[in-house]
Amino acid sequence: TGYVLWRLDADRVVRRFDESIAQGGQAVPTLVGRMARHMGIEPKAGMINYAVGDPFGYVPFHKLLEWFNAGDVETLRRVFEGKPVLLGSVLPFVDRHYQQVDLADWEENDNFAPGMLIHAQALRSLMGPGLIDDAPMAAVVVMVLMAAFLWWPARHWGVGLLSLLGFAGLATGASTWLLYGGLYLPLSAILLTALLAVGSRITYSAAEQVLERRRLRRAFGGYVSPQIMEEIVEGRLDPGLGGERRKI
């Protein structure tokens, strides 16, 4: 026997397997953990790998009884021998939980599938490549620092937006690559830092331009015509000393 409880994320989706679910963070025996240990696998906390395996089918219990009553040992062996077997409800309105992907191949359920399939997927993850670990904090810090450095190329809004899009693509690609390697790199803090760096620099540069235009108007407004003043403010005419010679 073991507990069948799961931690729910803020969006009510089950993503993590963790036996430390008792009060005070104490570990308790879970159904998946007990089954894994019975097969010689020591489970540890981590994210369920929803990419492992195809969607699940199921064997209705009445079909199992038909095979048993008919003495169809060959079919029973073919379906069940050498495999961990989970018994549970797959009814439409009983014990349903949101999952990251659609694990049930017999219905369209908007990822709101029987909770039994979460146990099956967690066990399948442990039997296969293992659960997904969190990336080292050092990797997250490095990516956040790289995002903060976007302050410098973002002086011009066009370059800033291109830098932001390029960095977002790079971070997403790195996160996906690490995920295939069994590591989860959270993107929210990284992308938020990049957005703040680019947005604040663009805002700062725009404020600088406004102040510079005001300074130029105060300095030259009483000495040149409105047309020349506009040329100076727009940066098409250098207001520096020295003058120019032109044929007119």
Image: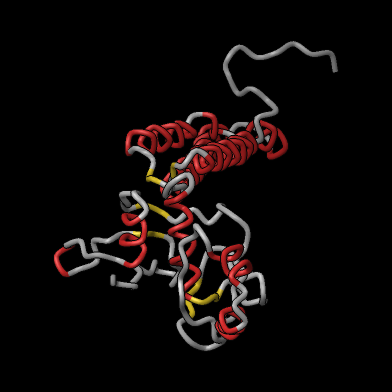
Instruction: Name above or below for residue 14 compared with residue 214.
Output: below
Residue at the image point whose x is 84% and y is 13% from the top: 247
Residue at the image point whose x is 85% and y is 18% from the top: 248
**Residue 245 seen from this side:** yes
**Residue 210 seen from this side:** no
Instruction: Name above or below for residue 66 compared with residue 230.
Output: below
| Image quadrant in which the N terminus is located | bottom left
Using the image as rendered, state which of residue 77 and residue 99 is in the foreground. 77
Instruction: Point out residue 61 in the picture as x, y percentages from the top left corner.
Output: 55, 82
Residue at the image point whose x is 55% and y is 76% from the top: 112
Which residue occupies the extreme bottom position in the image? 93
Indicate the colouring scheme.
secondary structure
Which residue occupies the extreme front position in the image? 71
Q: Left or right: where does residue 49 sit relative to residue 228?
A: left
- The number of discs equals 0
Instruction: Point out residue 197 in the picture as x, y percentages from the top left corner.
Output: 46, 41
Instruction: Point out residue 241 in the picture as x, y percentages from the top left corner.
Output: 57, 16
